[in-house]
Image (cartoon, helix red, strand yellow):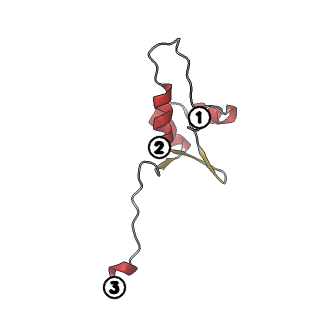
Amino acid sequence: MLENHQDAPETISPSPQRVVLTTREAAAFLGLAISTLNKWRCYGEGPQFIKLGRAVRYRQDALERYVEFSTRNSTSTTRHIPENR
């Protein structure tokens, strides 16, 4: 019997900074086509992403920041996304 709970494995609930999404999930989150995110990655545009081997993931907080930086009051407003997004 396991009486000592210190030996039990910890369950880690992801914080918003640690939630990672697949390209499909990120596209759904942003309301975009998967191909749009694929194209943006090739051209160095769009939200930051994580490359884990061949897998591509997006942090949810990075997607939320990208949406915030993309918010405009006018179509003539230029977008400025800082390098350290």
Calculate the distance from the C-alpha at mark 1 to the C-alpha at mark 2: 14 Å
Residues under numbered marks 1 and 2 in contact, where contact means CB atoms less than 8 Å apart = no
The amino acid marked with disc number 2 is Gln
Residue 72: % across, % down? 46, 19
Q: Is residue 18 left or right of residue 37?
A: left
Residue at image point 52% right, 15% down: 77
Sequence order check, earlier mark of 3 and 2: 3
Residue 40: % across, % down? 63, 32
Residue at image point 47% right, 13% down: 74
Report which residue position mark 3 lands on.
Answer: 2
Residue at image point 58% right, 39% down: 48
Report which residue position mark 2 lands on.
Answer: 60
Calculate the distance from the C-alpha at mark 3 to the C-alpha at mark 2: 37 Å
* Image quadrant where one finds the C terminus: top right
Q: 19 or 65: which is nearer to us?
A: 65
Residue at image point 39% right, 66% down: 11
Residues under numbered marks 3 and 1 in contact, where contact means CB atoms less than 8 Å apart = no
Residue 50: % across, % down? 60, 47
How many neighbours does mark 3 have within 10 angstroms: few (below 14), some (14-19), or many (20 or more)? few
* Image quadrant where one finds the N terminus: bottom left
Report which residue position mark 1 lands on.
Answer: 37
The amino acid marked with disc number 3 is Leu
Q: Is residue 72 left or right of residue 8?
A: right
Q: Secondary structure at mark 3?
A: loop
Question: Which mark is on residue 47?
Answer: none
Calculate the distance from the C-alpha at mark 3 to the C-alpha at mark 1: 48 Å
Q: Secondary structure at mark 2?
A: helix
Q: 54 or 49: which is nearer to us?
A: 49
Residue 24: % across, % down? 52, 41
